[in-house]
Amino acid sequence: MLSVRAILYVGHGTRSEKGAAEAKSFLQKIIRQTNVSIQEISFLELTEPFIEEGFIRCVKKGATAITVVPLFLLAAGHIKTDIPEALLPLQQQYPQIQVTVADPFGVQERILDAIAEMVMSTGAWSGRESLLVVGRGSSDPAIHEAFGKITEGLKRRLEAENVSVCYLAATSPSFQQGIEEISREIKAGVIVIPYLLFGGLLLDEIDQEVNRRNSKGQQVLHTGSLSRHQAIQEIILERSADREEASESSRA
């Protein structure tokens, strides 16, 4: 029997309608560039459709193999626990469906190159500014290790003296602590780097704090979400293609 492959994209989800629309628009661009007849968008939480609905849509359209492509930058609780838990009852309900899950992006040289380009494209980078990398946050210790690699990678690429990291939730230092601390050490301005794929309430929080500090005379800006850079789109397209090639090889 000929295998019919589907791709199920899984985003994090957000309470922000603007952020959800941005994620869906981005994924529609990916879908238009991917040569797979069945492709569905879903989210882990907060934004519909959820994983169950997206999965069932794939099945109803005739999929016999589903590649789950998580749109997550790093492997933490959502990748290790939440997505597998959401998929388990679906795999039990549809045991005939072959399910594979692509890896999260991880700390890639290409992503660090993209961030360095985004910093330089602000027009504010002279080499003297302080950089503040802001992660979503997780209690998983591996997240701190990953952000250590990210900050070191940015130091090398930009020859930056002061690169700090903070988080929006679940661990410390918090965003407020991080931006307050780095502001005390200012030699020039501060460039905030949200390590987030899309806009939403978390990016809004960063934007509001940046605007507040600028209104008080501090020189602060942020680079925006990472999906603005072409490299992110290329990575997702490659992950989808890699899984397609692997599936074709297994059928040969």
Image (cartoon, rainbow, N blue to C red):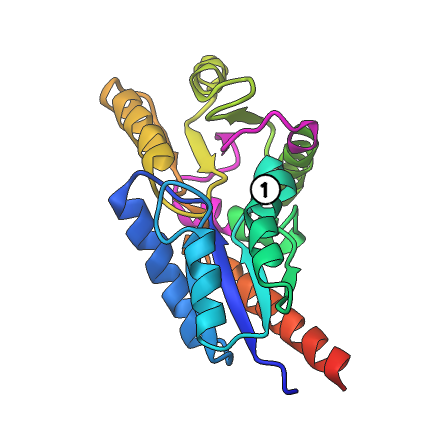
Rendered residue at 46%/12% (across/down) = 184
Residue named by callout 1? 158
| Image coordinates for residue 22, horizontal then vertical, percent | 32, 53
Reply above or below: 40 against 219. Answer: below
Rendered residue at 36%/29% (across/down) = 220
Q: Quadrant of residue 205?
A: top left
Reply above or below: 69 against 4. Answer: above
| Image coordinates for residue 180, horizontal then vertical, percent | 43, 14
- Type of the residue with mark 1: Leu
The one of 126 and 248 positioned closer to us in this rendering? 248
| Image coordinates for residue 116, horizontal then vertical, percent | 54, 47
> Does residue 205 appear to the left or right of 148 in the view shown?
left
Q: Give the range drawn in magenta.
A: 117-143
Q: Does the magenta stretch include residue 171?
A: no
Q: In which quarter of the image is the C terminus?
A: bottom right
Q: Quadrant of the N terminus?
A: bottom right
Q: Is residue 230 visible from the viewing direction of this image?
A: no
The one of 168 and 103 positioned closer to us in this rendering? 103
> Does residue 103 appear to the left or right of 12 in the view shown?
right
The one of 128 and 95 positioned closer to us in this rendering? 95
Q: Is residue 108 visible from the viewing direction of this image?
A: yes
Rendered residue at 69%/37% (across/down) = 149
Reply above or below: 226 against 241. Answer: above
How packed mark 1 is, by other alpha carbons closer than 10 Å (few <14, some 14-19, many 20 or more), is some
